Amino acid sequence: MSKAFTLDDIAFLTSDKGDTLLQKLATEDLSDRNLINLIPKLRGTYSAEQTSAAIETVKLRHKAVDKFGDEAAKMLFTQDALEQASDPLIRKYRSNKIARIDDDIHPITPDEQIIDAGCGIGSDTIALARNGFSVVGYDLDETRIKMAQHNAARLNVGARFATLDI
């Protein structure tokens, strides 16, 4: 069963201490057999919650390579959010389609923005921002919004995010 991330988990994972642990774990064998020995060593420095969040994040980053390539190593995910994140070809198609629609129907002016309702961890929002759109992603889940903010910042993308019941 996958871990349900909390805001405290996100705060730790995005801290210097959390980033250090994530970098260390990125090169570790995280198989069940190896975790039996690794977890007690980590618990000397990190809490059970921190250790669990970091291990889950690194495992998800490995799974995310198919959808996010090398950028997965910089991002935060939940199992559900990763499964729900659009395939890279779909993200590109949607972003390009919106660009063509707006060119054909009416040009987007600098004061207009696109809203990504139910943005999750921000994958579509980031794709739209990379295509030059002013975009804001909304989601009810504050944890996913924090992940989306982190993901956009780590990928140097100027998308904005806010918690909102859409």
Image: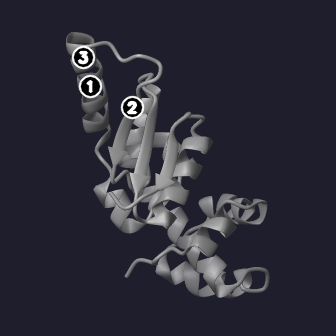
Q: Residue at x 46, y 23 (%)?
A: 111
Q: Which image quadrant is residue 12 in? A: bottom right
The reply to whether callout 1 and callout 3 are in contact (CB within 8 Å) is yes
Q: Quadrant of the N terminus?
A: bottom left
Going from N to C along the chain, the mark reached first, 2 or 1, is 1
Which residue is denoted by mark 2 in the rendering? 128
Q: Secondary structure at mark 2?
A: helix
Q: Position of residue 44 (x, y in %)?
A: 78, 86
Disc 3 crowd rating (10 Å Cα; few below 14, some 14-19, many 20+) is few
Q: Amino acid at mark 3?
A: Arg
What residue does disc 3 label?
100
User: Which of the marked residues, 3 or 2, is nearer the chain's N terminus?
Assistant: 3
On residue 61, the disc is none
Mark 2 Cα shell of 10 Å, populated few (<14), some (14-19), many (≥20): many
Q: Amino acid at mark 2?
A: Leu
- Left or right? Give the position of 15 relative to 48: right
In three-dimensional space, the C-alpha distance between marks 3 and 2, rounded to whole angstroms, equals 13 Å
Q: Residue 134, how many percent across, how many down?
A: 46, 29
Question: Does residue 120 lie above or below 157 as drawn?
Answer: below
Do the CB atoms of the residues marked 2 and 1 lie less than 8 Å apart? Answer: yes
Mark 1 Cα-neighbour bin, 10 Å: few <14, some 14–19, many ≥20:
some
The part of the image, by quadrant, that contains residue 20 is bottom right
Q: Quadrant of residue 29?
A: bottom right
Indicate left or right for 67 with 93 as reference: right
Q: What residue lies at 41% left-to-right and 51% top-to-bottom?
A: 138
Q: Nearer the viewer, residue 142 or 2?
A: 142
Q: CA distance from mark 1 to mark 3?
A: 5 Å
Q: Nearer the viewer, residue 84 or 52?
A: 84
Task: Report how far apart the C-alphas of labels 2 and 1 lie in the structure.
Answer: 9 Å
User: Which dot marks residue 98?
Assistant: 1
State the image coordinates of residue 71 (x, y, percent, origin top left): 51, 42
